Amino acid sequence: MTYESDPPRLVYTGDPEDPFVQALEAARDDLPNDEQLARMAAAFSPFGGAAKASGFWSPKRKLRVRSLQAAAVALAAAVGVGATVKLLNPFSFTKTEVAEAPVQEPGPSPQPGVVKRPRVTAPMVVPVAPSAEEPTERAPEPKPRAPSASASVHHEPVATAQPSRPSQADLPSTDMDGPENETALLERAHHALGSSPARALALTEEHRRAYPAGVLGQESDLIAIEALVALGRDGDARSAAARFRTRYPSSAHLRRIDRLLGNAAGAPAPSSP
Amino acid sequence: MSAGSTLAMDAPARESKRAAVDVGFDGVFERTAPFVWRALRRLGVREADVPDVCQEVFVVVHRRLADFDGSSALRTWIYGICLRTASQYRRRAPQLREVPETDAREQSVMPEQEESLERRRARDRLDLALQKLDEDKRAVFVLYELEELPMKEVAAALGCPLQTAYSRLHGARREVEEAFRALSKPGMKR
């Protein structure tokens, strides 16, 4: 048997309603939750890896993400959604910027091992918190970097209407622990890039199915291309980049895509069907 | 690994080695623990045993990280360790292989949990189907279809020629799907 390139994976070529394909998706999404990861990290204390490893899921990481979301909310309120999407691309934040951002009320994150079917949700109440020092009591989660553009889009309208901060009990369940919105879905996708590009790719597929006319289509495609590069699927990445270029010829993300593909000169990638 | 693939991996190998040195064990753990967990589950490690087997994997990683030569991607190297560790696990615990951790059908759930329960059931059936494969085919299927490694890396992790890996994938796909559909028939769920 000879292949010119790797054959398409079943999960991407099968009928999404096919139970077999759904089983593959479920298996692919079967990742440990925070508690399981923390326990696993703790098991390494005998040889020195536990303390740092378990620190990976420390509340500080979550705080940074929440802070970043709140910053995006505030900026969205100031400059408008469209401008914010351009300014806050999910890859532009440095650690310092994240640490200095104001805090948003912490909430439980989606289970990393469970992909919820995203649904359109009612506008969320997202209070803007005044301090960056507030501790979080929630279970920690791995958040090496935080995407940001998306946060601005969905949270912006309500943030402007919520000048004061309600207590934790007042927070609606439609926040992070409620039905997943476009923002949260892509946040997870971007977050997954570091530890599981395959999962990041799957989440962008999920995003495409759930939000065919979503406002974060470019960001979703960008994450997908980055995931394909991380997976070593250069051919697929170039095809996806070509589609992106056709669809968004003036996108600000094109420069980054060129860098990702080692295509600094900006030469168009091979066209795709 | 063939000379050709070694040559092709020269630059990535240097990056791979450098990346491993830069992040150290803690960094490697942070980056790979979730997918090690997932791979072990699909390679036949019971959920209750995954933490222990994960620990075995990372003990090996810890011991050998300094000797990692970068001739393959770091994750490929770690997947190779996963394959060997899971194989050892299955040999020493054969009586545990055929029993999914829980019977999802018996659980009482709220309506909003129904979807995740369905996914769990489908995943359990897939696990049963995977158990019907021989070890080599199972490894190729898991690494390619679920972990989404390129076939070159799959072959490297298994230490087999690329065409052999393709051939195993072809057979594994057919066998897994057949077994899954058979298990999905009424009265054949377990």
Image (cartoon, helix red, strand yellow):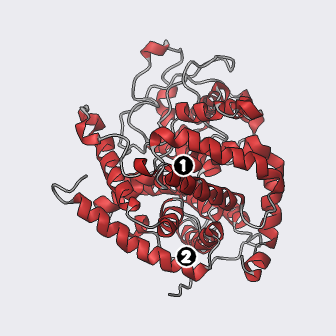
Residue at mark 2 to residue at mark 1: CA–CA distance: 29 Å
* Left or right, residue A21 beside residue B166: left
Q: Which residue is mark 1?
A: A189
Measured along the vertical axis of the image, is residue B119 above or below residue A125?
Answer: below
Occupied quadrant, residue B55 = top right
Q: Secondary structure at mark 2?
A: helix
Q: Secondary structure at mark 1?
A: helix
Residue A246's x, y, as percent? Answer: 55, 72
Q: Label 1 neighbourhood size at 10 Å, few (<14), some (14-19), many (20+)?
A: many
* Left or right, residue A18 beside residue B167: left
The chain containing the residue under callout 2 comes to: B
The residue lying at 16 percent from left, 56 percent from top is: B186
List the single residue furthest toward the bottom.
Answer: A2
Residue A200's x, y, as percent? Answer: 54, 53
* Left or right, residue B30 beside residue B23: left
Callout 1 amino acid: Ala
Callout 2 amino acid: Ala
Occupied quadrant, residue B77 = bottom right
* Left or right, residue A88 beside residue A184: right
The chain containing the residue under callout 1 comes to: A
Seen from the viewer's position, the closer of residues A127 and A60 is A60
Q: Which residue is mark 2?
A: B165
The residue lying at 38 percent from left, 55 percent from top is: B127
Measured along the vertical axis of the image, is residue A230 above or below residue B117?
Answer: below
Q: Label 2 neighbourhood size at 10 Å, few (<14), some (14-19), many (20+)?
A: many
